[in-house]
Each structure stands twice: as C-alpha cells, then as structure tokens.
Image: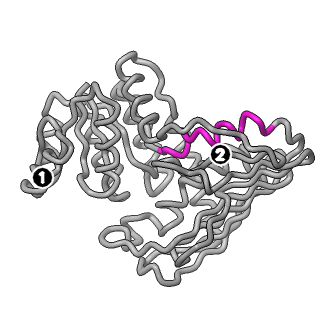
Amino acid sequence: MKVAVVGCNGFGKIHLSAMRNIGGIEYYVFSRDEQKAKDCMKEFNATGYFTKYEDILRSNVDVIDLLVSHDQHLKMGVEAMRSGKHLMLEKPIARTIEEGEKLINTAKENGVKFMVLEQFFFDSSVRKAREIMPKLGKISLIIVRSTHLYQPKGWRTNKEKMGGGAFIDGGVHFIDTLLNLGGDYEKALGLCNNYFSGIEGEDTTIALFKFKNNALGTILYSWSVPKPPKVPGFEIHGENGSIIEDPNTRINRKPFGDLVFNGEVVKVDQVNPIEEEIKGFIKAVENNEPVPMPPEIALRDLKAVLDVYKTCM
C-alpha cells in the first residue's frame, strides 16, 4: 500500500511516525520546499518525496493522507478522490456542512474510500466508558474539558482559513467524545470569546447540550489557560454513580487514561489511537470494506461545532 503524506509539519510527522511503527506501508512525503521534503524523507525513512501536489495525483500512490489548512480540505480532497486516490483527511472534515457533504458525495461518485482521521473516536478509554455506561442507569450529566495555553502561528491564526477558531480545530476532538458518550442531542448553546492566544477566531468556548435521552452535557475548551490544573478529560454521572477519567494515567498519544468507576480503577488498553485509525483505514482499502469511522460521524461533529457557533459568534 502506497501512501503520500501531504504535510511534513506538526501532525504530519505524527502520522509518519505512526506509519513507521505500523510497518507494511510504503509512504512518501510532500513539501513544496524541496530541501524540507528531502529532510522529511530522510527523517522518517520514506520511500520518496513530492514537491508538487499535481505529481501525487498523477502517481501510482494508492492513498493520500491530507494534513493541510481547513480551507484546503475541499479543493485538495476532491482533487485526490477524482484522481482515483483513497483519502485520509485530518479533522475537521471541512469548514461548512456543504463542504463536508461535497467530500462525502465525491468519494461515493468515484468509488474510493474516504475517512476523516479523528483519533478520539478510536480512543480505548472512551470505548471502555461506553461499554460500562449502562451500569450507571439513567444518565444526568456528561462533562468534557480541555484547557491549555496555545499560541499558534500561520494559518491557524486566520479565521477564514480555520472556519472559526480553537473550537473547530481542537475542540472538535472533544465534541466527538461528548457525542459518542451522550448520543444525539436536541439543543446546543454556547458562549465564546477571544483572550490571548493571538488568533482571529475565538480561543475559549463553553457549550451546553441537551441530549435526546434527557441528559445534559457540557464542554469547556480553551487555548487561553496557562499552567492548567490536571483534571479529568471527561466525567459521566448517572443514577447509579459515575465514571471519571484519570488524567494521571495518560501515556503516549492517548488523549485519555484509565477510568474510575464508582471509586474502582478500570484499566484501559494502552493502544495508540492514531496508529489504530490509520491501520483501520488501510485494512478497509486492502479488503474493500467500509472504513472504521464513517465520514458521516465527522460531519455530525462539525454540525455540533457549528450549532454552538450559531449561538456565540
């Protein structure tokens, strides 16, 4: 399986590290800067490199792994799939519902696999929590949170390229967790503000959800909290007790650690969710199976972000 990783910065390097660990993948790197492309190829022992996206589209690469600014998801993603390439796309799926639907429809029209890489969907802690949630009985409250200081450079400072601010970029991870725990919702409300992250969009959001099962959910996400305390990433409360994520047990690239169910520690398999999502997609391509995370889930997550934005932007 030949994969071209489009993006040698930041998360592109994390994807390349995952592919190197997985093995069995012939991967290539891309940068418009040839020296940077060569350096990236050498650093990750890639098979080769590209400096023009058009050359990838004309190549015999099977899969394009796209890690670019949000405003390029639609254009570059559609080009990839129309050229017959299967597509892995870093979250969010797009900036708007219309853009996301166009990507999904293009995959169907061209008979290729398409998956948004949302590693939180593959996190074993969330999956374990869902497994034991029925023991809580009726759910009353779900809390999801992430606060830290982040002052990005480049396109993440631009509201138009982002499609918003911190919430659509990093907060969408935690929206995925909230919805995977709470299910469908009836209403979403939010408060957003900009403090000192240095971006054009909002950097702090507090959102409330009312789920169809009558539970309430809240999410707190911020890039403007220096030296934040170590607190649970999620809590689930019900009539028979609670499930609390233990932040002291997080390792590697896992966003969440072990669970505490009514005071008892529940150990969780320590698997790398980024490796899991990439392995799952490659397997789907090789065996012509459905992708492990349908892109409609990423569209669901985007809709929730945009529903919050409607009330606070």
**Left or right of residue 263: residue 204:** left
The residue lying at 58 percent from left, 59 percent from top is 305
Classed neighbour count for the residue bearing mark 2: other residues with Cα under 10 Å, few (<14), some (14–19), many (≥20):
many
Q: What's under tag 1, amino acid-wise?
A: Asp
Quarter of the image that includes the C terminus: bottom right
Q: Exactly how many numbered labels are in the figure?
A: 2
Instruction: Work out which residue is located at the far right of the displayed protein and give it.
Output: 239
Residue 116 quadrant: top left
Answer yes or no: do the residues labelled 2 and 1 have beta carbons within 8 Å? no
Instruction: Work out which residue is located at the far top of the displayed protein and give it.
Output: 287
Q: Secondary structure at mark 1?
A: helix
Q: Which mark is residue 258?
A: 2
The residue lying at 51 percent from left, 37 percent from top is 271
In percent of width and height, residue 100 lies at: 45, 47
Q: Does 311 sit above or below residue 297? A: below
Colour convention of the picture: one colour
Residue 214 visible somewhere in the drawing: no
Query: Which residue is under mark 1?
Result: 39
| Residue span colored magenta | 118-133
Camera-nearest residue between 46 and 173: 46
Instruction: Work out which residue is located at the far left of the displayed protein and give it.
Output: 35
Q: Report, in whole angstroms, how far the alpha carbon at label 2 lies from the one at label 1.
A: 38 Å
